Amino acid sequence: MDITAAADTLRARLGDRPTPDIAVVLGSGLGSVASAVMDPVIVPFIDVPGFPAAGVAGHAGQYVYGTMGSCPVLIQAGRFHHYEGHAMDVVAAPVRVAAKLGVRVLVLTNAAGGVNPELEPGDVVLVEDHLNLMFRSPLIGPTREGEERFPDMSEPYDAALRKAALAAAEELGVPLRTGVYAALTGPSYETAAEVRMLGRLGADVVGMSTVPEVIVARALGLRCLAFSMVTNKGTGLSPEPLSHVDVQEVGARSGRVVGDLIQAVIASLPEGAQSRGAK
């Protein structure tokens, strides 16, 4: 995929507006977060060279550029998944495009199943680490310009941003757990045995996204923050069968909480902190 061509197309659509400081990736059922963007410019994925349309229900499949508070942000309403048949280059392309536009902070959201039995549908988890159980890396192949060959993953989710998120949650009176996100390829939901395995490996939530994007973001030097919306208990932890419709409904009900957290974190960052690290 031609990342430069994709970035140039987006930049042309934004006109003379300021370069976005922060990119926000919205997972299943969380599209309402984009409604908080002021003076939006909307660009469908299919208008971006090399981008396919979004193929999963609950993903709008468009960029929404505007401001949150005084900060220019680029909302990615939807994402591409490896389970759709997309190569990892396609899955990670939006991150590379965002970096090309000048974004230095990447905020990711996802719908996830609860592996930790204490988690309930509607809970929000601040991701502090992850398990890449996709057993694939979007960095395989020649090293791309601007990317580190062997990025350090000792702290994939920025400590200062996580501290800001926890402070924002306390200020808003929002319960915010911390935990480990396990990424599997999907698209089937996990078996009860797999959920038990994930728990023993240290996972709190499980999903089918986010990790490839974070790996590329770290290779590019972007700071990352991620929120998982628990949309269901993992198989074996609830007698109810899992349904993507339920995932969307819980995400829609609780998406405002995630949106409020994201806006509060963005507002808490001092000007210029996006690149140098908030303290």
Image: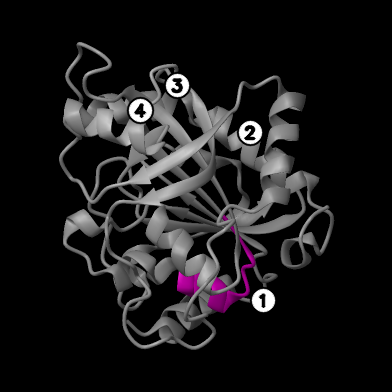
Res 80 quadrant in image: bottom left
The 10 Å Cα crowd at callout 4, few under 14, some 14 to 19, many 20 or more, is many
Residue mark closest to the camera, 2 vs 4:
4
Going by the numbered disc 4, the residue's amino acid type is Val
Q: Position of residue 106 (x, y in %)?
A: 57, 58
- Disc 3 secondary structure class: loop
Residue mark closest to the camera, 4 vs 1:
4
- Earlier residue among tags 2 and 1: 1
Is residue 71 a member of the stretch shown in magenta?
A: no
- Residue at left 73%, top 56%? 71
Residue on which disc 2 sits: 260
The 10 Å Cα crowd at callout 1, few under 14, some 14 to 19, many 20 or more, is few
Going by the numbered disc 1, the residue's amino acid type is Asp
Query: Quick check: 216 left or right of 61?
Result: right
Q: Report the span colored magenta.
A: 95-106
Going by the numbered disc 2, the residue's amino acid type is Asp
Residue on which disc 4 sits: 115
Instruction: In the rendered structure, find residue 277 and report the number of the disc placed on it.
Output: none
Residue on which disc 3 sits: 122
Q: Real-space Cα distance between discs 4 and 1?
A: 46 Å
Q: Real-space Cα distance between discs 3 and 2?
A: 14 Å
- Residue at left 77%, top 53%? 70
Q: Is residue 51 visible?
A: no
Is residue 100 a member of the stretch shown in magenta?
A: yes
Going by the numbered disc 3, the residue's amino acid type is Gly
- Disc 4 secondary structure class: loop
Depth order, front residue of 271/18: 271
- Disc 1 secondary structure class: loop
Mark 1 vs 3: CB contact within 8 A: no
